[in-house]
Amino acid sequence: MTTPLTDSGRITELSARAEAFLFIEGEPLLLNRLEKMLGCNSADLSLALDSLSERQKGSGIALIRTDT
């Protein structure tokens, strides 16, 4: 039996999945497309991308966000 993810756990999972999609895609993705791929809303995606950006600090990889 699995337990539901906490909000923090859900954002961490979304962050990891977003990273995978971005890596596989290899080119910029529109935010609304990434939302659909992840099955989340814009607020959760924003938190997930913030988390991903924070995790990438010092790694030599940078997440570049635009308004699209």
Image (cartoon, grey):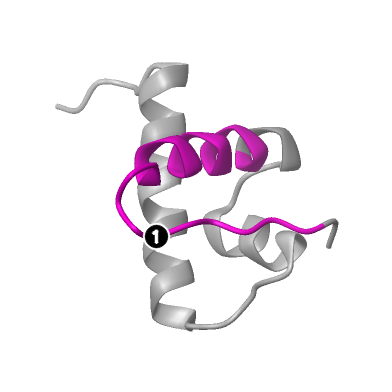
Q: Secondary structure at mark 1?
A: loop
Q: Residue at label 1?
A: 61
* Quarter of the image where the N terminus is located: top left
Crowd around label 1: few <14 · some 14–19 · many ≥20 (10 Å): few
- Asked if the stretch drawn in magenta spans residue 49, the answer is yes
From this viewpoint, which residue is outermost toward the right?
67
Residue shown at the point (53%, 38%) measured from the top left: 48
Residue farthest along the left direction in this orientation: 1
Of residues 8 and 52, the one nearer the viewer is 52
Q: How many marks?
A: 1
Tell me residue 2's x, y (percent).
20, 27
Q: Residue at x 85, y 56 (%)?
A: 67
- State the extent of the magenta-drawn residues as a range: 45-66
Specify whether residue 22 is painted magenta: no
| Amino acid type, callout 1 | Ile
Side (left or right) of 11 relative to 58: right
